[in-house]
Image: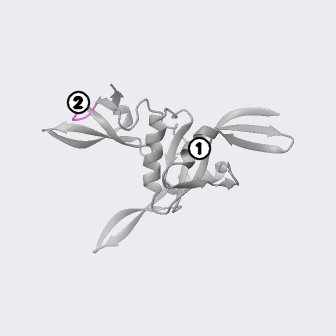
């Protein structure tokens, strides 16, 4: 019998229309509970399309899987005479399952089943996500204070409002003329203070 830790993608089922809220809530929980080593990526797969609105083309994003969110996390791969199985940390599984809007993992009974690598690659190809890129690992989370290292707001400090893992960008709330204003920067353009 062989056992090893691997990163696999799982699908979690959500209430319809709650996908982005679930993603945001999970990202905050993962950051707050310091689970970034276990849950490395959360994704609502969307396809970019163009629609004609009032005679003008407009880009819109359509969910590929309404009521589902993809989640990359560490799992234990066990291989024995019965085949291969994957187990996730029960505490992390409990945290994810009990997030508002989540109805459970896709799997058999209470055991989550990881997605096949080919399925994940196909989804990434559809949404235009480069699978050759390394997963973004950050030393800051939503709510943390950071210093801006480049761009127009260099050396200013602000609070992280949102992290976009799909596009590698972070939204930081910066004080501009006495008003908190969101500024979008690439993730490597900020440093936790």
Q: How many marks?
A: 2
Q: Earlier in the sequence, mark 2 or mark 1?
A: 1
Say which residue appears at 39% left-offset and 66% top-offset: 50
Question: Secondary structure of the magenta portion, mostly?
Answer: loop
Residue 152 is one of the magenta-drawn residues: yes
- Disc 1: which residue: 94
The verdict on residue 23 being magenta is no
Looking at the image, residue 54 sits to the left or right of residue 167; the answer is: left
Look at mark 2 in the image and give the residue it sits on. Answer: 156
Residue 78 left/right relative to 164? right
Residue interval drawn in magenta: 150-154
Q: Quarter of the image for the N terminus: give it.
A: top right
Estimate the x, y position of residue 64 in percent, counting from the top left. Answer: 51, 61
Viewer-nearest residue: 56 or 95:
95
- The residue located at (21%, 35%) in the rendering is 152
Q: Residue furthest top?
A: 193
Q: Find the distance from the CA under tag 2 to the CA under tag 1.
A: 38 Å
151 left or right of 141 in image: left
Which residue ends up furthest to the bottom in the rendered image? Answer: 55
Q: Which mark is residue 116?
A: none
Give the percent coordinates (x, y) of residue 128. 49, 53
Asked whether, in this view, residue 69 is left or right of residue 145, the answer is right
Quarter occupied by the C terminus: top left
Residue 62: percent from left, percent from top = 45, 63
Q: Nearer the viewer, residue 133 or 165?
A: 165
For mark 1, give the secondary structure. Answer: helix
Mark 2 Cα-neighbour bin, 10 Å: few <14, some 14–19, many ≥20: some
């Amino acid at each position: 019998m062989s056992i090893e830790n691997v990163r696999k993608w799982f699908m979690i089922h959500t209430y319809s229309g709650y996908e982005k809220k679930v993603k945001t809530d999970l990202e905050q929980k993962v950051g707050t509970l310091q689970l970034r080593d276990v849950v490395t990526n959360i994704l609502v797969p969307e396809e970019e399309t163009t629609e004609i609105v009032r005679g003008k083309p407009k880009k819109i994003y359509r969910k590929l899987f309404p009521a589902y969110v993809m989640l990359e996390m560490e799992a234990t791969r066990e291989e024995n005479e019965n085949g291969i199985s994957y187990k996730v940390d029960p505490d992390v599984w409990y945290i994810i399952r009990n997030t508002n809007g989540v109805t459970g993992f896709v799997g058999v009974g209470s055991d989550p089943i990881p997605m096949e690598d080919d399925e994940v690659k196909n989804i990434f190809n559809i949404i235009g996500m480069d699978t050759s890129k390394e997963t973004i690992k950050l030393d800051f989370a939503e709510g943390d204070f950071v210093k801006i290292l480049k761009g127009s707001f260099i050396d200013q400090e602000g609070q992280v409002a949102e992290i976009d893992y799909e596009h590698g960008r972070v939204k930081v709330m910066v004080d501009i003329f006495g008003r908190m204003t969101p500024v979008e920067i690439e993730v490597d353009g900020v440093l936790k203070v």
